[in-house]
Image (spheres, rainbow, N blue to C red):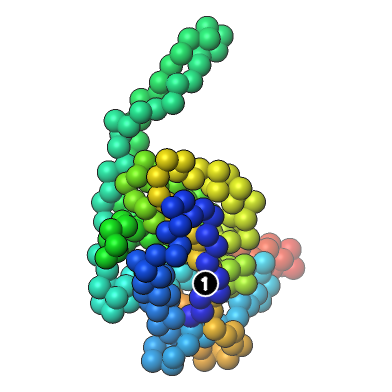
């Protein structure tokens, strides 16, 4: 798999020049570049999407394979700890807002739990790092970015990274997967959430397949229950049902 680029949205305290950040970036970049298909091939070659005969549905690659191989590489090769819980602080101070029409000052209690990050570690120079791998649906990507930004603003972490597919990879995956093209319009908002009185780096790394193939003997990456793969299967089943209904109606009409 290819690492294409890393976008640094903010870099408070010049963390980007630290040895800790350089080591972290190299570590997860190595884990990305060791995602292969077929296994042992030294590259990520995926089957080109193809429209099914008499259907509007495309056969595409699943996202579970990419996520599971990244997680494995990070744990087994790079030595990271997975699914790390982080307390984002339900009791943290909420901003004062106002009720309408009374104009009364009000603070809404925090009752939701953000959950953990995919990976959490600390650098040798003392920065706590959280990484989120996102091949879930686009709303999941937004949640991950918001969670990283809040953790940075509150000082729980000092480095936050989201890893997402490129637009070209997105086109080959199951429907509505998060990707850099759909997040690009929101970068200004996340950039504005920089911690004003502390240190913090928020980054998005973009990844892509190494090659596309039309070889029918190359299997598509297997689907899983994550992302929108279930949605794609339901669309396919619905389309198949419609096709069968049309065929049956035509046969009935001919009889």
Residue 199 spot, x, y in % from top left: 40, 49
The answer to which quarter of the image holds residue 169 is: bottom right
Q: Residue at x 52, y 91 (%)?
A: 217
Q: Residue at x 49, y 59 (%)?
A: 203
Q: Residue at x 65, y 75 (%)?
A: 51
Q: Is residue 250 visible?
A: yes
Q: Residue at x 63, y 77 (%)?
A: 50
**Residue 70 horizontal side relative to residue 176, left or right:** left
- Look at the picture and state if 199 lies above or below 171: above
Q: Considering the numbered disc 1 on the image, is that residue within a helix, a strand or a loop?
A: strand
171 or 70, nearer to the observer: 70
Q: Is residue 240 visible?
A: no
70 or 226, nearer to the observer: 70
205 or 175, nearer to the observer: 205
- Look at the picture and state if 52 lies above or below 161: below
Q: Residue furthest top?
A: 102
1 or 37, nearer to the observer: 1
The answer to which quarter of the image holds residue 242 is: bottom right
What residue is pinned by disc 1?
207
Other residues around mark 1 within 10 Å, as few (<14) / some (14–19) / many (≥20): many
Q: How many marks overall? A: 1
Question: Which image quarter holds the C terminus?
Answer: bottom right
Residue 2 spot, x, y in % from top left: 51, 79
Residue 207 spot, x, y in % from top left: 52, 72
Residue 1 spot, x, y in % from top left: 48, 80
């Amino acid at each position: 798999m290819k690492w294409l680029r890393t976008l640094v949205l903010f870099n408070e305290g010049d963390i980007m020049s630290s040895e800790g950040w350089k080591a972290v970036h190299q570590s997860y970049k190595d884990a990305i570049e060791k995602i292969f298909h077929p296994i042992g091939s030294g590259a990520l070659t995926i089957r080109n999407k193809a429209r099914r005969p008499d259907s509007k549905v495309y056969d595409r690659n699943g996202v579970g394979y990419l996520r599971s191989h990244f997680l494995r590489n990070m744990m087994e090769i790079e030595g990271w700890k997975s699914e790390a819980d982080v307390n984002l602080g339900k009791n943290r101070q909420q901003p004062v807002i106002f009720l309408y029409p009374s104009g009364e000052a009000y603070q809404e209690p925090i009752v939701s739990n953000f959950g953990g990050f995919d990976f959490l570690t600390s650098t040798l120079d003392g920065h706590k790092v959280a990484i989120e791998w996102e091949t879930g649906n686009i709303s999941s990507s937004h949640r991950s970015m918001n969670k990283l930004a809040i953790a940075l603003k509150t000082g729980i972490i000092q480095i936050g990274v989201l890893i997402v597919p490129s637009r070209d990879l997105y086109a080959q995956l199951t429907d509505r997967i998060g990707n850099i093209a759909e997040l690009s319009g929101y970068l200004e908002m996340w950039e504005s959430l920089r911690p004003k009185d502390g240190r913090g780096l928020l980054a998005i790394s973009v990844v892509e397949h190494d090659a596309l193939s039309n070889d029918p003997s190359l299997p598509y990456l297997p689907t899983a229950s994550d992302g929108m793969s279930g949605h794609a299967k339901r669309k396919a089943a619905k389309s198949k049902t419609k096709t069968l209904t049309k065929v049956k109606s035509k046969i009935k009409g001919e009889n």
